[in-house]
Amino acid sequence: MSSLLAVPLISRANDYPRMPINLVTPLAAGDAADRAARLIGQELSKLLGVAVTVMNRPGAGGSLGTQAVIRAPKDGYTLLYAQNSPLTIRRVIDPEAANYDPLTDLTPLALTTRSPSVLVVHKDAPFKTIKEMVDLARQRSGGINIGNAGPGSVGEISVQLMNAAVGAPLNSVNYKGAAPAVTDLLGGYIDAVILALGAVSAHIRSGSLRALAISSPFPDFPAIPTLRKLGYNADLLGVWFGFFMPAGVPGHVIDTLLPALEQAARSPAVSAQLLPSGMTQEWGSRQALAEEIATEYRSIKELLGPTSKNGK
């Protein structure tokens, strides 16, 4: 029987859930990912018959919220909805703050959502393709400045991936979030930005910004190529999101939660509201999520090497 069929009334034999569930997200309220957490949480609440309350715990690149869930009681009433930054990138660039292992300190439940990152430039930029941008970077004293959402963001890592692939002086400029990076790009203070698609999709649609590359194909923007499609031996790093619980949660809790979580995360109603925000649904099993974390962590550690904090 398909797991997408309606979840039956939950057996109360194991007495779970019997009270509200806290859904922690290490993100600021109001952005696309926060909206995804709330949409999935609302569906999950309907299916489980208890309130699912979203709690925003931003800070330290997502490490603060992640650690809060690691320290939470192991009773199934605290969930984490987190992106890859605190689970892979921050562990490489700031291992003192992100001094945890999501595969042992947390229980991975499922990968549920993706948002591609995209490289965009001003509509009046003097280059129209990645090749032209790279050529200009080689010719211009000081190279090309590419903004991102902050240290440890997918944009910052993507600039380093591009540098390794194209061998041109592409400079990563860190901002405190996506909004100020977009503002400076529109104002002509930087040459490009690499951000999650949701942060710039409205500007792409309006024509004020032009997209030159995307980390993975997206239905609403099929003409934007990936770097590999353009012939480069790299791709931008995208954003993915998954659900977790503290390590040590009883197995019967997970067995009760997972079918409801899958139906909530794959709901057509959720999908219809995520796509305009630059996000897509993608259900990945517990094992698939664990493998994604391990593979990405190794790749970023190899890429950054001794440049990461404390040389780790």
Image: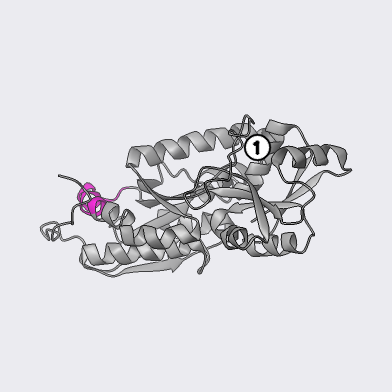
Residue 171 sits above or below residue 149 on the image: above
Task: Residue at 41% x, 53% y: name it.
Answer: 70
Q: Toward the viewer: 276 or 206?
A: 206
Q: Amino acid at mark 1?
A: Leu
Task: Residue at 54% x, 58% y: name it.
Answer: 198
The colour scheme applied to this rendered structure is one colour
- Can residue 68 be seen by looking at this rendering? no
- Can residue 216 be seen by looking at this rendering? yes
**Label 1 sits on residue:** 161
The picture places residue 140, in percent across and down from the top left corner, at: 87, 42
Left or right, 101 with reference to 181: left
Where's the C terminus, which quadrant? top right
Where's the N terminus, which quadrant? top left
Task: Residue at 72% x, 33% y: name it.
Answer: 166
Task: Residue at 49% x, 46% y: name it.
Answer: 100
Provide the secondary structure element on which disc 1 rests. Answer: helix
- Classify mark 1: residues with Cα within 10 Å, few (<14), some (14-19) or many (20+): some
Residue lying at the far right of the rendered structure: 141
Q: Quadrant of residue 184?
A: bottom right
Left or right, 312 with reference to 140: left
Residue 47 lies within the magenta run? no
The picture places residue 309, in percent across and down from the top left corner, at: 67, 43
The picture places residue 160, in percent across and down from the top left corner, at: 68, 39
Q: Mainly helix, strand or loop, the magenta region?
A: helix
The picture places residue 84, in percent across and down from the top left corner, at: 50, 47
Left or right, 126 with reference to 291: right
Numbered range of the magenta stretch: 248-259
Q: Quadrant of residue 52?
A: bottom left
Residue 258 lies within the magenta run? yes
Residue 146 sits above or below residue 135 on the image: below
Tally the numbered discs.
1
